[in-house]
Image (cartoon, rainbow, N blue to C red):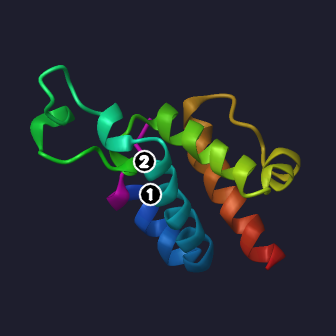
Amino acid sequence: MESLTKENFWNALMAKYPEQMKVFCAWVDEYKARNEWGSIFKNGEDKFVRDTGKPLKYHELPIAMQFGIFYQFTVESEEYDLFYQDVAVPKTMDDIKDCIEGFFFLQKMKA
């Protein structure tokens, strides 16, 4: 399973679906603030995970966490029906990339 890094996945989606990804990125920023992202990803010594001095970015999270947050985006953006009815629900970790890209493709077609 290839990870969903900025370089190998999210940048490609930004190029293919710029308007849809702008909405998603703005939502992620709001989600991070609402959920105190910086506090969540600190270790016991009050240092950020990986000792970078900064909280983890969305695309640095494990793939399952990225998908869970993405799924929450579909619910909160009231696009859950589009995702649930028209995009195949992933059955394996390898399916996640196709599901996310399929969602943005359908959003673009709907616009």
| 42 lies left or right of 28 | left
Question: Magenta segment, which residues?
Answer: 1-7
Element type at marker 1? helix
- What kind of residue is marked 1? Phe
Q: Quadrant of the N terminus?
A: top left
Indicate whether 6 appears above or below 62: below
Indicate whether 102 appears above or below 46: below
**Residue at the spot 26% in from the left edge and 45% down from the top edge:** 55
| 41 lies left or right of 33 | left
**Residue at the spot 64% in from the left edge and 51% down from the top edge:** 73
Are the two marked residues, 1 and 2, in contact with CB atoms closer than 8 angstroms? Answer: yes
Q: Position of residue 62 (x, y in %)?
A: 40, 34
**Residue at the spot 50% in from the left edge and 57% down from the top edge:** 30
Q: Quadrant of the C terminus?
A: bottom right
| 106 lies left or right of 47 | right
Residue with the mark numbered 1:
9
| 30 lies left or right of 88 | left
Question: Which sits in the foreground, 43 or 14?
Answer: 43
Please identify the residue farthest to the top as the structure is shown: 44
Decide whether residue 21 is among the magenta residues.
no
Indicate whether 12 appears above or below 35: below
> Mark 1 to mark 2: distance in Å?
5 Å
**Residue at the spot 58% in from the left edge and 36% down from the top edge:** 68
Write down the quadrant of residue 61 in the picture.
top left
- What kind of residue is marked 2? Leu
Crowding at dot 2, Cα within 10 Å, few <14 / some 14-19 / many 20+, comes out as many
Residue with the mark numbered 2:
4
